Image (cartoon, helix red, strand yellow):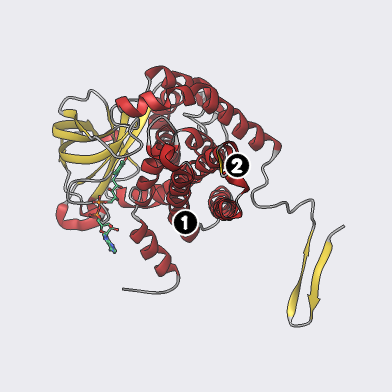
Amino acid sequence: MPAVLFRDDSIPSVSLDAAASPALSTLSDDERLFHDSVLDFASKEIRPRVREMDERAVLDPGLLTRLFDLGVMGVEIPESFGGAGATFFHSVLAVEALSRVDPAVGVLVDVQNTLVINALLRWGSADQQRQHLSRLASDTVGAYALSEAGSGSDAFALTTRATSQGDGFLLEGRKLWITNAAEAGVFIVFATVDLAAGYKGITAFLVDRGTPGFTIGHKEDKLGIRASSTCELLFEGCRVPRAHVLGEVGKGYKIAIETLNEGRIGIGAQMLGLAEGALEHALRYTQERKQFGKAIAEFQGVQFQLARAATDIEAAKLLVYNAARLRDARQPFLKEAAMCKLFASEVAERTASLAVNLFGGYGFVKDYPVEKLYRDAKIGQIYEGTSNLQLVTIAKTLGLRP
Ligand SMILES: Cc1cc2nc3c(=O)[nH]c(=O)nc-3n(C[C@H](O)[C@H](O)[C@H](O)COP(=O)(O)OP(=O)(O)OC[C@H]3O[C@@H](n4cnc5c(N)ncnc54)[C@H](O)[C@@H]3O)c2cc1C
């Protein structure tokens, strides 16, 4: 029976069926099973490799194969193409669970699902889907190349050119900061067919690794998420057939805006998982470490800090899950996506910093896992739109204009 929560003549009555309205963070049986199996995989298969991958700044290739086997590299790809045929929310759960152990692996899976596969599912032609989706589900990593040296926050100031030539385009230019570039077999590349047309010239192309005139350049040596590759891409007389245009010529800006709105929820999930991992380490350590004759977790000052971190994480989770569920329900989620990325990335940094503090000197050395999470947290406030740019978006939804 629905329970009437309150009744007042001035306020419409609200009735909620407790069974049909679980907490926003409640997972269905299927979602719980999926999340837990990815977390179990992360604990068993990724955790033993985290330190070495971070130090060597490379992803273990064996791990990549296992990620494909696990089904997290093609979460939303229909089963007919060999994917898991699941939802965007499942992608978010996978990114959260993986990032709890290694946010560098989390972002690999995030870009694959929330940007590359998402764009192909929404804008790919039947031929393009046939050509790419089975590979992306089974053995091919994807990358998403929008940023350039001179265009980051102002992404549509990009200058990589696509000149129409016969039945194709000639790509010329340089992309920077491209996640997954070292491993990827297919790249979504944004270029302009007409610099003078501004954002209306921007077009998305599917470019295979190994296409003549396309090379992977310098790999960045980063502060955090070091096992995630970040490289420049060089296009020098790279010929791409017209059939490789994703969506329509001149509509690349729409693809970029919409996929990045969704991608932001994935980064929110990455940062949520990171914060959960940091809190887990802090809880364990503070109950083991003794000072003044007792576990440091018995000091109320420490308990308050842990309680505040847990509250932060719960709030971040509600924002991330809400944005992801709105997206799956085809409801507007622009503001919610910006808020969840903004907040979850701040929570990740705060929680990882607290974990370092609570580990004391051990928090500052590489023998313990929290210094890496502290380094990894910083990226959440930078990529897929800096925190300032999320605030710009949120301010616009309040009706504010610069
Ligand atoms: C590890 C890593 C991985 C990445 N992966 C990818 C990828 O896979 N694909 C891709 O295309 N890109 C990727 N990027 C690029 C990333 O999205 C950009 O770095 C980011 O959007 C910021 O752009 P920028 O570095 O040019 O900084 P800038 O845009 O130059 O910003 C510098 C500062 O100015 C502030 N600022 C700029 N404009 C405004 C404004 N209007 N109002 C207030 N403040 C403002 C910013 O908030 C920031 O603090 C990656 C970057 C990194 C570091």
On screen, residue 265 above or below 288: below
Location of residue 236 by image quarter = top left
Residue in view at x 16 percent, y 34 percent? 235
Mark 2: secondary structure: loop
- What amino acid type is highlighted by mark number 2? Gly
Depth check, front residue: 196 or 348: 348
Q: Nearer the viewer, residue 88 or 252?
A: 88
**Residue 315's x, y, as percent?**
57, 55
| Residue 266 in the image, given as x and y percentages of width and height | 46, 44
Report, in whole angstroms, how far the alpha carbon at label 2 lies from the one at label 1.
37 Å
Q: Which mark is residue 343?
A: 1
Find residue 278 and name its label: none
> Please, which residue is most extreme toward the right here?
1
Residue drawn where x is 38% and y is 41% of the image: 376
Image side of residue 293 versus residue 17, left or right: left
Residue 373, quarter of the rendered image:
top left
- The quarter in which the C terminus is drawn is bottom left
Residue 106 visible in the displayed image: no
Relative to residue 69, is residue 303 depicted above or below?
below
Q: Quadrant of residue 6?
A: bottom right
**How packed is label 1: few (under 14 Cα within 10 Å), some, or many (20 or more)?**
many
Q: On the picture, is 269 further left or further right than 382?
A: right
For discs 2 and 1, the disc positioned in front in the rendered view: 2
Mark 1: C-beta under 8 Å from nearest atom of ligand 1: no
Q: Residue at x 54, y 27 (%)?
A: 43
Query: Could you tell which of marks 2 and 1 lies nearer the N-terminus?
Result: 2
Element assignment for label 1: helix
Residue under the point 43% across and 23% down:
49
Query: Which residue bears the numbered disc 2?
Result: 293
Q: Residues within 10 Å of mark 2 (few under 14, many from 20)?
A: few
